[in-house]
Image (tube, rainbow, N blue to C red):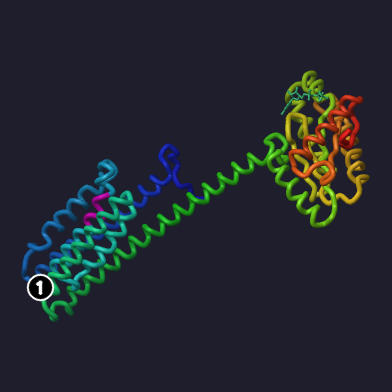
Amino acid sequence: MEQISPDTSAPPQRLIRDKFVDRMWWCVCSYCMVVIPLVIWREAALGGGLTRMAPVTALSVLTIAVTPIRQRLPQVVRQGLPPALLALGGLAGLYSYGLQGSGMTAVIFGSVCAITVAPLRTGVAAVALIWLAVIMIAISYVRGALQAPFGVEFASSAVNWVGTVTTTILLTVYLSAAIADYQRSTGLLLRKVERQRDQIAALANHDALTGLPSWRLARDRLEMACSQAVRTHTRVAVLFIDLDGFKAANDSCGHQAGDLALRAVAQRLLEAVRTTDTAARIGGDEFLVILNGVEAEAAALRMAEKIIAAIATPIRYQERQLHLGASVGISFFPEHGQSSEILLEHADQAMYRVKRSGKNDYAVFHDA
Ligand SMILES: Nc1nc2c(ncn2[C@@H]2O[C@H](COP(=O)(O)OP(=O)(O)OP(=O)(O)O)[C@@H](O)[C@H]2O)c(=O)[nH]1
């Protein structure tokens, strides 16, 4: 799996943009290496020297020269030079040869680069200026104020076509690769963000120690179970389980033993309930079981007995045995409440009744 970057100090968007700028730099550098001899060739063929393209040729030479030290250039220069060079070269080409050179290609790619690397407003302003210049050049040609220095004869010559086709292919290949890479990196970043979002959601919805759903997720499941029970004319049972003797086990054997006991209880609850039911940890030594589609109260009571028996089985910790019990309070939807909060509160009250009357047993909520 490709890493976006090992450097975690810089924001990922900047790392992706820096990578794109570097690819773009190589693209422009190779373009310059091909364009300089082609321009010289073309200008020599026309017999006009380097007069028209001289400033762009000089800028191209400068770009090639500073390529080895591009990382040390100020960020604004590193990001701005390649699109500026493409756009200026393109405009100079359009100005000099009209549509008979590869000027338009360079202008288009220069605009794409400017809008990709610059902040939105600057990019839009730069592209607007570039295209204003294109329109002015076009109007000058249409009105006859500007004329290409060669006629049909040169336009159909090998020199002109080799120059136009080569530079267009070069720009297309390099910039397409750079843009594809940019998109891939952005996709990777998005997937990373999605994974982290899922992890955060999982952490919020699950208890870190036991892996059981937290109250947050259990509440959603309880609400769904209640809606389903209304449709199927069944009931939902909420079993509030508080461990007995947990503090003593924790105090005598240590916190690690307590953690192990909590994980063991979670495992036993999962084994006791159906996969369609929910076992959750909602507090220190408090668990919740939600039974869906309960048809008769007796089924929930049998489940309470099963859970009490499962938790009563001693838990082995090193050379010792941890003995726990469970006090279980039960409430039913719809008769004991319409909302998840009320159902939980009533199951809690029933559980306290068990605690007060000797623990390790179950009781169903009643109003009295
Ligand atoms: N090891 C461990 N202990 C915890 C954790 N969360 C809460 N506790 C401890 O669990 C204990 C819960 O106390 P009580 O509810 O009074 O325990 P109890 O002995 O079962 O008492 P009753 O509920 O009155 O029967 C406290 O000592 C908490 O410190 C945890 O994640 N790990």
The C terminus sits in image quarter: top right
Q: Position of residue 168 (x, y in %)?
A: 27, 68
Q: Amino acid at mark 1?
A: Gln
Q: Say left or right for 74 vs 143.
A: right
Report the residue at 25% width, 59% height from top.
Answer: 128
- As drawn, the residue found furthest toward the front would be 368
Q: Position of residue 321 (x, y in %)?
A: 85, 26
Q: Position of residue 49 (x, y in %)?
A: 6, 65
Q: Position of residue 361 (x, y in %)?
A: 91, 32
Report the residue at 67% width, 36% height from top.
Answer: 208
- Which residue was labeled with disc 1? 147
| Corner quadrant of residue 365 | top right
Q: Which portion, as a residue range, is magenta? A: 80-85
Is residue 83 located in the magenta-colored stretch of the structure?
yes
Looking at the image, residue 20 lies above or below residue 104: above
Looking at the image, residue 329 lies above or below residue 169: above
Instruction: From the viewer's side, name the closer residue of 55 and 343.
Output: 343
